[in-house]
Image (cartoon, rainbow, N blue to C red):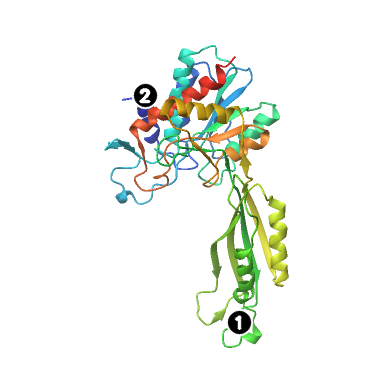
Amino acid sequence: MSNTLELLKDLIRRESVTPYDAGCQDIVAERLIKLGFKEERLDFADTQNIWLRRGAALPLFTFLGHTDVVPTGPLDAWLSPPFEPAIRAGKLYGRGAADMKGGIAAFITAVERFIALHPDHQGSIAIMLTSDEEGIATNGVVKVVEVLEQRHEKIDWCLVGEPSSDKKIGDVIRIGRRGSLCAKLTVAGIQGHVAYPELAENPIHAFAPALKELTEEVWDHGNTFFPATSLQVSNINAGTGAENIIPGSLEIQFNLRFCTELDEETIKQRTRAILEKHGLNYHLDWRLSGNPFLTEKGALIEATHAAIKTVTGFDPVDDTGGGTSDGRFIAPAGAQVIELGPLNESIHKINENVGVEDLDILSIIYENILINLLLTA
């Protein structure tokens, strides 16, 4: 069995449900310190973060990952216990196998092989891990980046080991992600008896035309790299539970996944304009989960394409689909950022899994990316 598989098994055995690391970072640090990496713990609140760097020269290549996993869901629905790695029909099962302990295991073993063969490589290599990605991500990578920025430690290339692949390893590279802007809207009305609507003000009725307009708004038309921005309502709540009471308030949650054609302030202004057009008495709270980012071209994409072609024989597709990732905190500082990892078909699902052979293929791709970037003249 490969070193990557064995490392992944060790990581899966750690019940690192977000925001807990459960010792995963200790496993990684123990292996990398032996190779000359300097360890720095950058913990904030209940989140564990680690920054491991080998070398001080530029350029700086960074592998980024998260050790936390989503909750398992009902245990009796799993074919085997989620934190006891099990192999069936060529696949390794366990929570975090694909998202994203598989990526972590692959890039750790890639680094080990690369350094063993090329101890005097150019530039520096770093590993950044957090236990706060699957949650609200307030004390993870965003805080680590702040520390790095304060001391002018710049990342040139960042590869996020998120599960980007679709049908086979390396067929899709994420070169960017849409932004995510969350909103909690409260519309005030006047509570009353349903038989006397003239004495009340129904916030549901008042908001309905605005809801239609918000969901039908053409925010933009997207561009070459991103689909059009989309607003989706995730929850609507009103009422007292009684069928004969007009509610006094209405609460709505919605989210906009927006592309580089828009920015946060423009979305807020256009949303307020629609709400005020309908004369609503409202309060609106916003939370920016992340701005869109895009690595359109550069040495990192070129090196990754070449590595995938060398290892697999095919050319990958550049894509910006999916949700958000911690890459959104790295890109604003000027780094080239991509995501490349295992197949994403089973992520967050019951019986999450990764192909055993895929792990070695992915690790070899990672190693070739390092060769392409850090062994050039």
Q: Secondary structure at mark 2?
A: helix
Which residue corresponds to the image point at 58% horizontal and 61% vertical from the top-left? 253
Q: Amino acid at mark 1?
A: Gly
**Mark 1 burial class by Cα count in 10 Å: few <14, some 14-19, many 20+:** some
Residue 316's place in the image compared with 236, above or below, is above
Which residue corresponds to the image point at 45% horizontal and 25% vertical from the top-left? 310
341 horizontally vs 282: left or right: left
- The image shows residue 226 at horizontal and vertical percentages of 59, 47
- The image shows residue 103 at horizontal and vertical percentages of 45, 33
Residue at the disc numbered 2: 3
Res 192 label: 1
Nearer-N-terminus badge (1/2): 2
Residue 78's place in the image compared with 124, above or below, is below
Which residue corresponds to the image point at 57% horizontal and 28% vertical from the top-left? 300
Residue 36's place in the image compared with 131, above or below, is above
Q: Amino acid at mark 2?
A: Asn
In front here: 97 or 91?
Answer: 91
94 horizontally vs 69: left or right: left
- The image shows residue 138 at horizontal and vertical percentages of 59, 43
- The image shows residue 174 at horizontal and vertical percentages of 53, 39
Q: CA distance from mark 1 to mark 2?
A: 67 Å
**Mark 2 burial class by Cα count in 10 Å: few <14, some 14-19, many 20+:** some
Residue 349 in sight: yes
83 horizontally vs 206: left or right: left
Which residue corresponds to the image point at 33% horizontal and 49% vertical from the top-left? 75
Q: Nearer the viewer, mark 1 or mark 2?
A: 2
